[in-house]
Image (cartoon, helix red, strand yellow):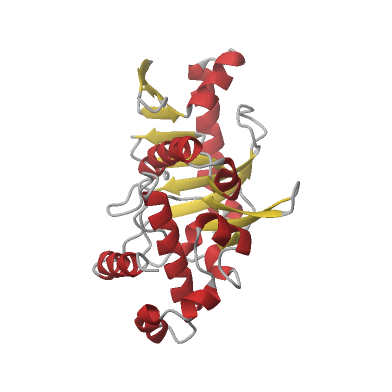
């Protein structure tokens, strides 16, 4: 078995046709439990086989995949592996088709952003905006395997930003200095956005998100674009505070529209 370290603390292992990338705390947990990596990979393979045999049973994706790119969002309770902080897992599984999302890229980017949030946001901001933790990334080069890449994450319960009634909460808007819906509606420079979307809500959310990305950019945290499905509003049961969790930080581009649209919206958000 070959092992390699990364600057982000990712521990990578290669065994035959399998490559395993571990987030640092998961690697440390394996070390603490004196888990044999070869045995762990074997258990992991059995865990994945159960998913492959009946993906419909474990499907937790509320959205229908439009382009049939072979991406499955599955949920499974972990009673076999025993190294994750949360046993209810969400798994992003890729069949490895050309042009599909890359779970490995999401794994690395999530770890990088989590570090940036931790070191560049203040405590109040960190309490309101978080990155969904990622545990490990599994990749196999076995040709007849259904899932070629799998990202392991905790299952987060919440409502997608696109389904919220009024966008970001008043506390979130105040903390990150983002205008609320009513304030945006009174800004003339966003007239075109409101015209494009008669319902207005979708465009208002896009504008709020653009403001957020601009505020983060000022701290050196670069998020060019996100699908509203990838931001979950969750309720902290301890303090009844609404938190927002980015579950997939990879930029969402719908070429050729999105880059130009995001550039224009971001530019308009610079004005008071």
Q: Is residue 62 visible?
A: no
Tally of numbered tags: 0
Reply above or below: 65 against 133.
below
Report the residue at 45% width, 87% height from top: 198
Report the residue at 54% width, 25% height from top: 25
Quadrant for residue 143, please give it. top left
Reply above or below: 125 against 230.
above
Report the residue at 61% width, 27% height from top: 83
Give the image location of residue 265, x and y in percent: 34, 69
Report the residue at 61% width, 28% height from top: 81
Reply above or below: 40 against 173.
above
Of all residues, the one furthest to the front in this rendering is 272
Q: Which of 35 and 5 is in front in this view?
A: 5
User: Which image quarter holds the C terminus?
Assistant: bottom left
Reply above or below: 91 against 270.
above
User: Which image quarter holds the N terminus?
Assistant: top left
Give the image location of residue 31, x and y in percent: 55, 15
Left/right placement of residue 103 relative to residue 32 reads left
Q: Can residue 2 be seen in this view?
A: yes
Give the image location of residue 96, x and y in percent: 34, 47
Quadrant for residue 61, please give it. bottom right
Of all residues, the one furthest to the top in this rendering is 34
Left/right placement of residue 142 relative to residue 230 reads left
Q: Nearer the viewer, residue 258 or 209?
A: 209
Q: Nearer the viewer, residue 237 or 30?
A: 237
Left/right placement of residue 181 relative to residue 260 reads right
């Amino acid at each position: 078995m070959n092992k390699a370290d990364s600057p982000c603390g990712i521990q990578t292992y290669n065994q035959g046709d399998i490559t395993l990338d571990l987030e640092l705390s998961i690697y440390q947990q394996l070390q603490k439990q004196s888990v044999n990596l070869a045995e762990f990979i074997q258990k992991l393979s059995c865990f994945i086989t159960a998913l492959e045999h009946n993906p419909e049973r474990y499907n937790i994706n509320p959205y229908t995949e439009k382009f049939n790119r072979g991406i499955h969002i599955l949920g499974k309770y972990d009673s076999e592996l025993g190294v994750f902080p949360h046993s209810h897992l969400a798994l992003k599984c890729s069949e490895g088709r050309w042009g599909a999302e890359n779970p490995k890229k999401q794994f690395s980017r999530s770890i990088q952003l989590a570090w940036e949030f931790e070191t560049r946001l203040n405590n109040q901001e960190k309490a309101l905006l978080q990155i969904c933790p990622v545990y490990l990334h599994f990749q196999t080069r076995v040709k007849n395997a259904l899932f070629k890449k799998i990202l392991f994450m905790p299952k987060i319960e919440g409502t997608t930003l696109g389904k919220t009634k009024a966008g970001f909460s008043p506390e979130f808007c105040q903390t990150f200095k983002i205008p609320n819906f009513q304030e945006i509606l009174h800004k003339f420079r966003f007239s075109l956005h409101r015209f494009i979307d008669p319902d207005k809500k979708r465009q208002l959310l896009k504008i709020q998100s653009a403001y957020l990305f601009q505020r983060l950019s000022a701290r050196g945290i670069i998020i060019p674009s996100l699908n509203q499905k990838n931001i979950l509003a969750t309720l902290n049961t301890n303090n009844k505070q609404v938190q927002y969790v980015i579950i997939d930080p990879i930029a969402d581009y719908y070429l050729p529209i999105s880059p130009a649209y995001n550039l224009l919206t971001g530019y308009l958000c610079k004005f008071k």
